[in-house]
Amino acid sequence: MNLTNLITEIGDDADLLARSDSWLAMERNRKARELEEISRELRALDLAQRIKGFLQQKNLVAVQQILRDADGEIQNILVKIMNLPDAMAILRSGHDTLDAVNAAGQMVGWQNDGYDLATSAALRN
């Protein structure tokens, strides 16, 4: 390739030609790290979708439970796999507004995923 073709190919990014070699190398490394992180996130999203599909076939859900110490302070957040009626019972046993918001968000998500919350609640009772 000749220089004219290379400059045409760089197009709107021609301003990079005015940057130092060290800056270009540093920026290239930064962008490569960003791409690696995005790639990792995409793999995690893909895996989560595949796992959720499997759970839905078995009528199971992943429930995010907030664990607290004796003083009510959040110690950890745990994700458990269980049947929907049990998951709903755990979420309904919350202690405060944070638990209620967490429960509501998860239940809306389950409903959006096609789970029948009313029937599941009746199965638990």
Image: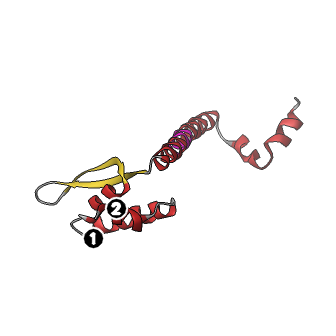
Residue at the location (83% across, 36% down)? 6
In this rendered view, identify the residue nearer to me: 82 or 17.
Answer: 82
Left or right of 8: which side holds 33? left
Q: Quadrant of the C terminus?
A: bottom left
Q: Are marks 1 and 2 in contact (CB under 8 Å)?
A: no
Q: Which secondary structure, mark 2? A: helix
Q: Which secondary structure, mark 1? A: helix
Left or right of 61: which side holds 124? left
- Residue type marked 2: Leu
Task: Give the prevailing secondary structure in the magenta stretch.
Answer: helix
- Residue type marked 1: Thr
Find the residue positioned furthest to the top: 1
Q: Which residues are magenta?
A: 38-45
State the image quarter where residue 117 is shown: bottom left
Which residue position is annotated with label 1? Answer: 97
Which residue position is annotated with label 2? Answer: 123
Left or right of 66: which side holds 11? right
Membership of 32 in magenta stretch? no
Mark 2: give few (<14), some (14-19) or many (20+) Cα within 10 Å: few
- The answer to which of marks 1 and 2 sits earlier in the sequence is 1
Residue at the location (11% across, 59% down)? 71
Q: Is residue 66 above or below residue 81?
A: below
In this rendered view, identify the residue nearer to me: 114 or 25.
Answer: 114
Q: Quadrant of the N terminus?
A: top right
Left or right of 7: which side holds 113? left
Mark 1: give few (<14), some (14-19) or many (20+) Cα within 10 Å: few
Q: Position of residue 3 (x, y in %)?
A: 86, 33
Q: Position of residue 120 (x, y in %)?
A: 38, 62
Distance of mark 1 from mark 2, alpha carbons?
26 Å
Find the residue positioned furthest to the bottom: 97
Which marked residue is nearer to the observer: mark 1 or mark 2? Answer: 2
